[in-house]
Image: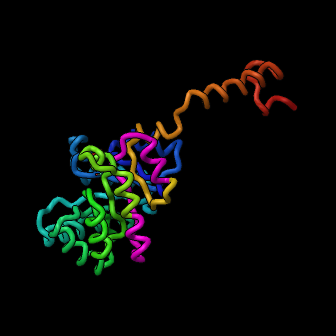
Amino acid sequence: MKLLIDDANIEKIKTIYQYYPIDGVTTNPSILAKSGRNPYEVLKEIRAYIGEDAELHAQVISRTAEGMIEEAHKMAEILGKNTYIKVPTIPEGLKAMKALSKEGFKITATAIYTPMQAYLAAKAGADYAAPYVNRIDNLGANGIDSTKMIQDIFDNNGFKTQILAASFKNSNQVQELCAYGVGAATVAPDVIENLIKNACVTSAVEDFITDFEKLCGEGKTMLDCQ
Ligand code: E4P
């Protein structure tokens, strides 16, 4: 499962990239709005930091397919070849996906709340379909089960489209989908940190260091013991 950062704050992105194996960054208009800055300025800053080979996902805003297609051209030109154009999975979005996929654009079908939206996006040529796990839970449905059903739909119908699971609020949601083998997850920085945060692990590592220092002296490491 690929792991992406769902945030546009460059400082947070740098912190997470420093420690964790990350495949790219996703944004949406609400995430960009938090910056209060020009969206291209923010997205270009992210692209410069993550490099041209990493995935960068950015969303179109237009309500019509024609507008979405025009935006996609401008975004890909400015943000580089490995930019995934996020297109909302509504009728106009499906129309745009069909056209953009024929033109060779990389497409992430977004705002997916139901498995049938994902099915239609896959048929329309999307590379990724992004179900909103936690938002589905908040509707009284089950985001994990819906996402697993989407995976089954893709597998059983021979679609090449991958899942980019989104909208996570806890590490268990990520773990469940990782175990199921979905293609990718985009996760907010605090939830990524919680994937590994564990007092037992910290304590075990500290015990190893304490024992070693008892053996070789305070502050000593394997560099000092020959
Ligand atoms: C990604 O495609 C979505 O825009 C994002 O993960 C939504 O997350 P939220 O439900 O936390 O806003």
Task: Give above or below for 107 relative to 177.
Answer: below
**In this orientation, which residue lies closer to the viewer: 141 or 72?**
141
Q: Residue furthest right?
A: 226
Which image quadrant: the C terminus?
top right
At which x and y percent is residue 170?
40, 40
Q: Residue 105 at x, y = what percent?
A: 31, 73
Q: Taking 223 as reference, is 122 above or below it? A: below
- Residue 115 visible from this viewpoint: yes
Way the structure is coloured? rainbow
Q: Is residue 135 magenta?
A: no
| Left or right of 182 in this view: 108 | left
Q: Closest to the observer: 100 or 199?
A: 199
Image quadrant of residue 138? top left
Residue visible at 24% across and 77% down? 98
Q: Is residue 166 magenta?
A: yes
Q: Nearer the viewer, residue 8 or 172?
A: 172
x then y, percent, for residue 130: 33, 59
Q: Tell me which residue sits at (45%, 60%) in the image.
A: 182
* Count of numbered tags: 0
Residue 67 figure quarter: bottom left
- Report the front residue among 156 and 41: 156
- Whether 36 is drawn above or below 202: the answer is below
Magenta-tinted stretch: 151-178
| Residue 78 seen anywhere in this rendered image of the structure | no
Left or right, residue 14 beside residue 73: right
| Residue lying at the far left of the rendered structure | 64
Instruction: Determine the residue positioned at 30% across, 76% down.
Output: 123
| Left or right: residue 216 compared with residue 130 | right
Q: Residue furthest bottom?
A: 102
